[in-house]
Image: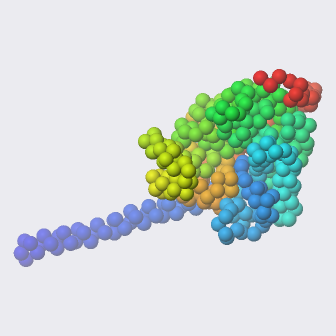
Amino acid sequence: MPAKVLLFVAVSVCGLLSLPVVFSQSQSSSTDDAKLRERAMKLHREAIVIDTHNDITSPMTDQGYDLGARDTSGRTQTDIPRMKEGGLDAEFFAIYVSASYARNGGSARRALEMIDGVYEQARRHPESLEMAFTADDIRRIHKTGKIAALMGIEGGHAIEDSLSALRQFYRLGVRYMTLTHSNTNNWADSSGDSNNQNVKHHNGLTEFGREVVREMNRLGMMVDISHVADKTFWDAVEVSQAPVIASHSSARALTDIPRNMTDDMLKAVAQKGGVVMVNFGRSFVNTKYVKPNAGTQAKMDEIRNQYSGDPATMRAKLRELQGPPPRVTLDMLIEHFVHIAKVAGVDHVGIGSDFDGVGGQLPEGMEDISKLPAITYELLKRGWSDADVKKVLGENFLRTMAEVERVAKKLQASGAKPSLAKIGAVAKN
């Protein structure tokens, strides 16, 4: 047989022999991934999965939205069928009171309407939802297969500068309060208007604001520092005798916006025994999504000046300049969990999705609440232990909530009385 023919046969045989090896490696990789996904789903179902911030309460209140039926319109990210698909065990419904109520009045009434809406959903769907008020309630309801429904006020102006109102909200079931929303109120500065010179700021918490924190400690209501100005954060950490939480904030080192937390803040929350819950919104996850580079910003400013009298053309020119928004991937979201765990410790990070509060601006692969198991899979893929993943999914938050409850019982047993301070009767600075 000619040498060329022998060479051809040898190469062909070698090629054929190598094919099963390549296929086997691919098949092995696929099998390994399938096993990891199966392990992730099993772990996710075993764990207590808690989301500490969901704004579906607004459409519930304003549009009569019912959680019971799957929403196929694409307008919302939350309903009971998708909660169950996502393995959710406890949801904090945001009692969000917009800044307009602080300006125009009716903040407390708005909060009451939203609280009533949460109770109404639990009444309509007793087979799926049950109101919860303590960490033990969450554990008990988890065992029944139901979803624990809890509430957190978003925007301290909801109490209308009244500690009596704060106490009534606690009695109605509110278990955390975000000290501010995007607006500075009468006793605490917000990150949302910190650069607005037309807003009267307090340099953090006023004395009445400190009384609010103290009374929250006595009641057992968690102090939430998402949305607050940096100085307000440090004041709250100093005053609070209980752990503080960030119900829906991510890491500023990765996404440089005021709503996210610096590494020093992450460490301070950890030292206090608290937990930081990662916000899923694109602008919280990728700086490029919310902040153009300096050159682009200068061109945007030029367009705004040139077409100030022609808003339609201005918007068209800005869209043309900016182009499509940058991709925000699931991996970018997971990096916030990883970073916070690295800086603050794995005992101090959790989930604060902000579903239905960030519109459609969610990372690819985390489009609605049914996608929560992806977090478990991604963390396992990065080598996290089952125990650490369970901490992130809910155990960290349960520990913090239980500690806030313990501090409240201790304060009450020591004879601590409800504060009688009124905003007009104490110095504001």
User: Which residue lies most toward the left here?
Assistant: 2
Where in the figure is residue 132, as x and y percent of width and height? 83, 51
Residue 360 x %, y %:
61, 58
Q: In the figure, is residue 322 to the left or right of 76?
A: left
**Res. 89 visible in picture:** no
Residue lying at the far bottom in this picture: please name it.
1
| Of the pair 177 and 384, the residue shown nearer to us | 177
Identified at 11% across, 75% down, the residue is: 5
Q: How many marks?
A: 0
Q: Residue at x 58, y 61 (%)?
A: 38
Please identify the quarter of the rendering in which residue 43 is found.
bottom right
In the displayed structure, does residue 296 sit left or right of residue 179? left
- The quarter of the picture where residue 60 lies is bottom right
Would you place residue 180 above or below residue 123 in this image?
above
Instruction: Depth check: give the residue in front, 75 or 309.
Output: 309
- Say above or below: 319 vs 288: below
Q: Who's the residue at 70% across and 68% down the image?
A: 71
Q: Position of residue 185 (x, y in %)?
A: 77, 36
**Residue under the image location 66 percent in, 51 percent down:** 353
* Colouring chosen for the image of the structure: rainbow
Front-lying residue, 395 or 250: 250
Q: Is residue 422 visible?
A: yes
Q: Quadrant of residue 243?
A: top right
In percent of width and height, residue 19 lies at 31, 69
Against 60, residue 204 (above or below) is: above
Q: Quadrant of the N terminus?
A: bottom left
The C terminus sits in image quarter = top right
